[in-house]
Amino acid sequence: MHGFLNDRIRIELKNIVGEKNIYESGFDKDAYSVDVWSVSRNWVDSGLIKELPNFVVLPENTEQVSKILKLANIYSIPITPRGAGAGGLGGGIPFFGGIVLDIKKLDKIMSLSAKSLNIRVQVGIMQIDLEKYLNSKGYTLNHLPASIYCSTLGGFLSTRGSGVLSSKYGKIEDMVLSLEVVLPTGEIINTLPVPRHSAGPGIENVFLGAEGTLGIITGATLQIYYLPEERYFSSFLFDNLHFALEASREVMVNGLEPSVLRVYDEGDTRDVVKKELGINIESGSYVVISFDGFKDIALAQKRRAEEIFNGYRARDLGAKFGEKWWENRYDPYYPPHTLESKKDLYGVIDTVATHDNIENLYLSMKSELESKFSEWGIIYTAHFSHWYKWGASVYPRFIVKKPPENSHDFMELNNAIWDCAVEVILKNNGVLSEHHGIGFQLSPYMRAQYRDGYKVLESLKKGLDPKNIMNPTIFGFDL
Amino acid sequence: MANYVCPVARYTKLETNTPRGLAFIYSLVAGNLKKIDKVAVERTYQCNLCRACEAISRDDSSIPELILAARRDIVEMNMAPESVMKLKDDICKNSRLLDKDWLESAVSSAKSLPDTVVVINYESESSKKIFLLIKKLLDRGNTGCIEINIGKHPAPAAMLDELGYKQLSGTVLNNLTFLIQNLKFKKMVFITPYDLELLLKTSTVDAGLSKLVHSFEFCEGFINSEKKTPAKKNEKIIYIDSGGNRKSGKFYEIPRKLLADSAGLNIQEMVWNGKESACCGGLTLQYLYPGIFNGVISLIYGELKEYGSKKIITPCPHCIDNLKTNEDLRNNYEIVDLWEMIFQ
């Protein structure tokens, strides 16, 4: 978009959001050309990409979002919705230029119902602001991801995010009662007021996890909870990962409701747990488990879980290590841990599968990545941190400390690692992402993931976004 | 990822106003991928240097130090915005610590002060009030108390340093050192902490430094020596932390202890407090970017509205002056200095 058209769009955007909410200087646009995806940072550091968007726009209300999308439709301008830029898969990068629509000024708390326990908010609110607000009134959302300090609610809704308490309280989509959405063509819609009904399929699910490809979520009504009366923590050391996974599966299938259940593989146990918690463990698998709510109920559940763990000869490390993990639960996301300022090639391949498949999936991925990329000294560790009655998610991380210096080779190695990992995931009936979304990195695999079901996604895209202006790189749509 | 504590970014929402965004700008410049331009200069001076990002950092990295270095470079390249130069000139014109004649007369008119507390003060209604309270108390104990009023600005050395004028800031500190060395005082109390901090950080002069205290510490020492049982008022007040002294953390507990133990008050904590408290950038932001400054004040006001109490207590004289610039706050709240509350 150049010359006359660029000027024309600027004038029209100015009429919608005012001059103070439009940015088009080089440095401002550069900062919106990266996120936490290591490849994007590598390319910027090498001078290969810069100033991707034409405009960065910060609307102040839903009507302005609507007008921007209507304008974008007229001129077929790509729109990249963006929260706080904490995504690790390149989902917020405006590869085709156009407008970055930063939602962070949509941050108002509209209402709180103490009777129905729900809150209505605009989704540009930072998650930590929302949680602190709720805590000050005796409530919690129980959505506490490691990135709580640097992500917006909209980011979590658009990627179906999970928090550390998801094993009891569910993922963010489980907390949604209804959504306000601006469709790609600019219409503002509201989904039904409650999510459990038999009046059709429930269209909120079309937009949850859609990463802005099918519209922009601007408001949400969410279930909230009372702060728990008590939180009990325990930590255990199992002889091996298999025992830890089996014991945890038993906890879940027997209907116990741990809020936290984290199983660390042997590499994570050795490296991360020792570093983070100062525990000297040479082998085995470390598990942190927590129960919360009313004291007596939580305590009874905790005891039953301990009985299950004892059946697997787990060593009880007591409460304090679990409590320490809780106190430091957000630390792993902070620099230097995020690596965003380092030159390493890294990625998180969070994956979810049934109990039948999850252990094999993990073992196969580890063996494949470590053997195929041994010359690069790939480091692969994992933990299993979001549990369901039917399965669990595995959170593997890979790091290559000395990646190729050339950015093209860097990208090629990155893609080869992901290709290998995704092949293992699909072979083992896993799903690509449990809570980080798809972004740019995983989009090429969406057809293989969905198989014939991809047609449904494609039809939704064609129907809702006929000009393919919304985050056009995401999900691999070919319109 | 310390973006959430940055009061400027919480107001503007712009990525390049965040600590991460600024670090990103400097990495492009350091990597010779871009040259500093007008926008980079603007973003660099829009930071209010509250140091919250540094205080919560999990490692030793300091974005504020990067920003200060960038500002020095900008000054050296003659790229400082007009508002920065204007403020620098104003500080130079209205700070007595840069006036040699004043310095010499201050020293000669108070040569021997062994039993005297010297209060380093500046021209503001709230700081004057604090000085009078200190004086009133000390007069009861037959300890002398004199005020050295350094002029219009509360901390000229820190302000010049913030603006990127390192050399001028050093001159102010040297002159402050000259005062310390030539006045034979018992204690020197700083109403605001900024120049004191800079002095302690940079000075190589030992003589007298141990006698320098921040007003909170002085206040605490005095109250402890009184050993009075507090009147149980149970009045609910909202306490706002000062953005100053974030890294040391020691000035968070002292005022709370004083308010609860000595004044018997029931403290309503802000959601964002302690090291995470929003700071309006009392030193320079109000002159350079009044729009952002007012926006940060409105953020604080937005949070205050959530609480029942209409009485605010703060240890920061800048907060008192600055919060009152907001009409709603001025009209609807009683904003009281910590000292005043305790002495009441």
Image (spheres, rainbow, N blue to C red):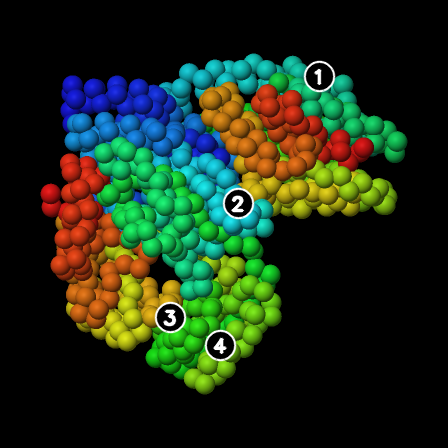
Query: Which residue was labeled with disc 3?
Result: A389
Name the quarter where the C terminus of chain A is drawn: top left
Q: Chain of mark 1?
A: B
**Residue located at (30% from left, 39% from top):** A216
Specify whether A186 is left or right of B51: left
Query: Which residue was labeled with disc 2?
Result: A113
Q: Residues within 10 Å of mark 1 (few under 14, many from 20)?
A: few
- Taking depth in this image into account, of A90 and A468 the one nearest to the observer is A468
Secondary element type, mark 4: helix
Query: Which residue was labeled with disc 1?
Result: B105
Looking at marks 3 and 2 on the same chain, the residue that comes earlier in the sequence is marked by 2
**Residue located at (69% from left, 25% from top):** B127
Residue projecting furthest to the front: A199
Query: Which residue was labeled with disc 4?
Result: A305
> Compared with residue A456, is residue B166 higher up or lower down, i.e. above or below?
above
What residue type is disc 1 on? Answer: Ser
- Taking depth in this image into account, of B244 and A104 the one nearest to the observer is A104
Query: Which numbered tag is attached to residue B322?
Result: none
